[in-house]
Every structure is written in C-alpha cells, then in structure tokens.
Amino acid sequence: MGAELTSLHPVEVSQSPQFLYSLHGGRDARLREPMAVTVDQAGNLYIADTGNDSVKVFRRDGKLLFSFGKSGSAAGEIDYPYGIAVTPEGNILVSEPPNGRITEFDSRGRFRRILVGRTNDMGLIRPGPLAITPQGEIVVADLWGHQVLVLNADGELLRRIGSPGNGTGQLKYPQGVAVDGEGRIWVADGGNNRVQVFDAEGRFLFKVEGPSEGSFALVRGLAVDALGRVLVADAIAGRIWVLDDRGQGLFSFGDPGQGEGQMIHPIGLFIDRSGRIYVADRGRDEVQVWGYPESDAGSQ
C-alpha cells in the first residue's frame, strides 16, 4: 500500500465512507471467492479470483477488460491466488500458496517470470498477502512460515520480520500486510487474532488486540489511507474497523448480511489514489467499492 498514499479524501479522520457499488464479474465471468484486489496507476482493478484460479481485470467503472491465468502449476498458470500487488513498473505480482511461489505478469496478464519459487533459500513456504513499500520493496506474509519477508524487486531477501509463536513480535498465520506513510509495516497476525506493528527495519513497535469496544473476531486484510488511518478486515464480524495511526479504534463500516453494503467474509483491502476503498468479500463472491461520493468525481 505504500505507493497508494496520495489520495485527497476523506478530509476528516472521523469521516466514514459510503457504499458505492459491487463488482461481481457478470454472468459469464462471475467472481468466485475473491481474496485480494489492487489498482494500477491507470485506475484498472486487478482482482485475485481465487476460486477460479485466475485474475480478472476491470475498469474503474466496473467493465470487465480481460482475465488471465488458468489452474495449474506450470509457468504462467495460477493455483489459488491469495495476494496481488502492482510493482512501480506496472507489473502484477500474484502469490500462490499451493504452488509456494510468487509469479510476475505484465499489465496485460502475460507471464514474465517466477519471482520466488517453491525451492528458495529464504524459508518462504506459503506466500499470502502482498504489499509494496514506497521504495518498491515487496512485503510478503508467509502463511505457513509464520513470518513476514521483505524482498527487493528481484525477489531477493532483504529483511525477515517475526518468528513462529504468540509472544510479542511473534506471528501465527499472518493474513494481511500494509505499509504506512512512515514506512511502518502493519501485520494482521491472524492466528493470534491481533495486529502487530513493526518499523521499516522489522523492529517490533506495538500491537493492537482489537478496536476500542472489544477484540477482533477474525482479523484479515489491512490497508492504510492518506490520513494514516488503518483499515482492518474482520472476516467473522463482517465489517471493516478503522484505526488511527496509534492503533486506537475510530469507527467501523459495513455489517454482516446479504444486503447492499453488507458483508459476509471480507478478506482483502485496497485503497486507491482517490481514496476509494475496495473490499474483497470472499463470502459474497464480490468486491465492494466504498468512498466519498461528494468528492469522488473531482478527484481524478
């Protein structure tokens, strides 16, 4: 999320977003259990269509442009895409836990290379959520390795964050990563049901056990907006918590259900340059778009 910290809205820390619309993929290309979403510099959405072992690409207005990937383990094939991110060069990174790798495609979905493979010397086991730092470094949550790795653009290890366990600074099944404007790395420590915060070098800073009114139900995806607010997807609670930059709860949006703007199992989060919030809801087979409509039109 580090490259997406230039949005103009919201203008107040206490301002809550409004539900705008949902993306389903249409009758012939319907999303199935999407786990992650990202947006490129042109405003196109790349959605990890996890249940279909592919990536679907939409215009900002919701029109499907194309999809890429098919189920498998050969070069260019995809198995259970879990994390997705856009590099500073505009290429697309896709993490595949069953294949134990991170694959790089160009913006048209053409295979470029396997950035990190199953056989690697850094101990990466099951790559999950991805984030990009302002310096273009790649942050990877290792689901089974109970760690977060920071890589350079060529997939080489720079830093390792955390170790298996439930102590301070330790991790268990990390399910989300985000980078804030200070370079701090926020980690959704899923197995310990908390959020932990590390500095850019990987040193532990503090942890968040839950919003001010209680604990998280099931912490998953993370994102940071231009005001430094941290969004936390709470999958079982069916809502998104919004924290300040110290981890204090501000408010939440969304609530459990099948109605418009309601959520069943929100997993992935992304915030684009205009401040629009994208929520990959695995339980509803859709990506919801939230934002600030009174300022949306003039922000592009």
Image: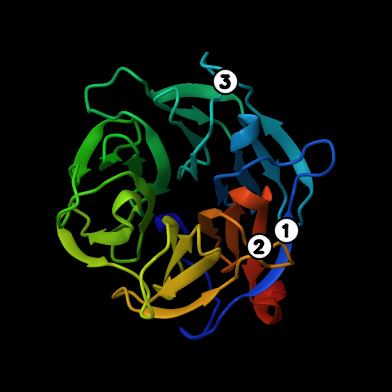
Q: Is residue 127 above or below residue 148?
A: above
Q: Please, what secondary structure does the residue beneath circle 1 have?
A: strand
Circle 3 Cα neighbour tier, 10 Å, few/some/many (<14 / 14–19 / ≥20):
some
Q: Which amino acid does label 1 sit on?
A: Ser
Mark 3 sits on what residue? 77
Quarter of the image for residue 250 reads bottom left
Say the numbered circle drawn on residue 64.
none
Residue appearing at x 56%, y 80% in the figure: 16
Q: State the residue at coordinates (29%, 66%).
A: 182
Badge 1, how many Cα within 10 Å: few under 14, some, many 20+? some
> Where is residue 163 drawn, in percent x and y?
17, 43
Q: How far apart are marks 2 and 3 (CA)?
A: 28 Å
* Count of numbered circles in the view: 3
| Residue 175 in view | yes
Judged from the image, the secondary structure of the residue bearing numbered disc 2 is strand
Residue tagged 2: 289
Say which amino acid is labelled 3: Glu
